[in-house]
């Protein structure tokens, strides 16, 4: 495992640093040059950040497009330039009596497919430039709203000025924007004071290692406790094994006939149980390699 060819780390990024800063610290600790992660977390946000090394970086897009779970604390009565406490406060408003708030109505409104306009302080690119770079220059880009999906949302009142919000959602969902939308509906505005990404697909934050814990561990501890092979992140995905002849074709990117049911995503192994990558089995029972990791 020490060559990190197909390796990953399930990291719990702390609040206060960017995803790229966390990535740089991890790369430096284990002396790796090629690495990527599964979706940017804002500096204020903490939680799951899966880091992929070398060949495993080919899996980044799969997890970038995966469903995510979050827990957030919203402060009511305030809005900011960034939608969270990291920005400049734009307004302070009176908060209505939350005892009269119809929580179930809000939850119903924000369940299913909804539209969101991406915030200016985000990593989305416009004409090749990140939106947050425009925002820092005081330039506002008029972006069209995008459809995202909220699979589940639970809102609880913490006190007379704060809400706890738990969300499972599709890729491209901005929790800061969701909180702002909820604040508008309540009639006082809102911003995020705390945000934790708790899940990516079926990977839970309970499986993660904190950044400081990781950085203070020995190389032996890291390899034994925290480094995992990329295929283990897909433990609930179907599996197939290929012969040496088919392996040769798969490694060339060629499709092969296989005795298995059609499947949109499948893990591919050789007869010695070495992970080769992921693929798809079509209706003609052909195995089509998508991402080869060897």
Image (cartoon, grey):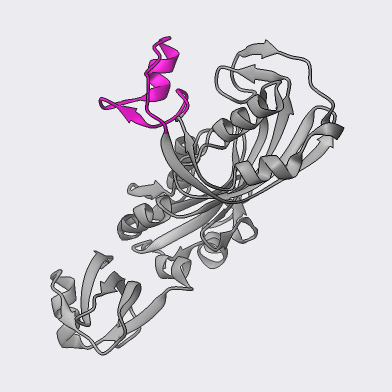
Visible residue check, residue 275: no
Q: Is residue 53 left or right of residue 284?
A: right
Q: Please name whichever residue, 11 or 267, is drawn nearer the observer in this view of the structure.
A: 267
- Residue 71 place in picture, x, y as percent: 66, 45
Name the residue at 40% across, 54% down: 52
Residue 93 painted magenta: no
Name the residue at 73% across, 14% down: 93
- Residue 232 place in picture, x, y as percent: 46, 70
**188 to 266, vertically: above or below:** above
- Residue 168 place in picture, x, y as percent: 58, 51
Name the residue at 73% across, 20% down: 77
Per the rendered image, the range of residues in magenta is 119-145
- Quadrant for residue 204, please give it: bottom right
- Residue 89 place in picture, x, y as percent: 64, 13
Q: Please name whichever residue, 202 or 270, is drawn nearer the observer in this view of the structure.
A: 202
Name the residue at 47% across, 24% down: 121
Q: Please name whichever residue, 278 or 245, is drawn nearer the observer in this view of the structure.
A: 278
- Quadrant for residue 75, please give it: top right
Q: In the rendered picture of this protein, how many numbered marks are placed on residues?
A: 0
Q: Would you say the magenta stretch is mainly helix, strand or loop?
A: loop
Quarter of the image that includes the N terminus? bottom left
């Amino acid at each position: 495992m020490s060559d990190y060819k197909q390796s990953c780390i399930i990291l719990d990024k702390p609040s206060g640093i960017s995803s790229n800063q966390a990535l740089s610290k991890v790369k430096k600790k284990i002396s790796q040059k090629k690495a990527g992660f599964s979706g940017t977390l804002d500096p204020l946000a903490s939680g799951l950040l899966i880091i992929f090394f070398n060949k495993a970086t080919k899996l980044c897009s799969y997890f970038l497009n995966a469903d995510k779970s979050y827990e957030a604390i919203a402060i009511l009565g305030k809005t900011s330039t960034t939608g969270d406490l990291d920005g400049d406060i734009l307004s302070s408003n009176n908060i209505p009596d939350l005892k009269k708030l119809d929580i179930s109505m809000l939850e119903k409104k924000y369940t299913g497919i909804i539209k969101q306009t991406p915030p200016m302080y985000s990593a989305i690119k416009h004409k090749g430039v990140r939106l947050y770079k425009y925002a820092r220059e005081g330039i506002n880009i008029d972006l069209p709203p995008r459809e995202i999906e909220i699979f589940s949302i639970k809102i609880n009142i913490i006190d007379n000025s704060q809400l706890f919000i738990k969300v499972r959602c599709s890729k491209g969902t901005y929790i800061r924007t969701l909180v702002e939308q909820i604040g508008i509906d309540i009639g006082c505005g809102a911003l995020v004071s705390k945000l934790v990404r708790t899940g990516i697909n079926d990977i839970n934050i309970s499986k993660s290692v904190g950044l400081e814990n990781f950085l203070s561990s020995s190389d032996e501890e890291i390899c034994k406790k925290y480094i995992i092979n990329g295929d283990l992140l897909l433990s609930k995905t179907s599996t197939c094994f290929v012969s040496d002849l088919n392996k040769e074709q798969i490694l060339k990117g060629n499709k092969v006939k296989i005795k298995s049911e059609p499947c949109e995503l499948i893990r591919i192994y050789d007869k010695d149980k070495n992970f080769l990558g992921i693929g798809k089995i079509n209706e003609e029972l052909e195995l089509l390699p998508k991402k080869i990791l060897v």
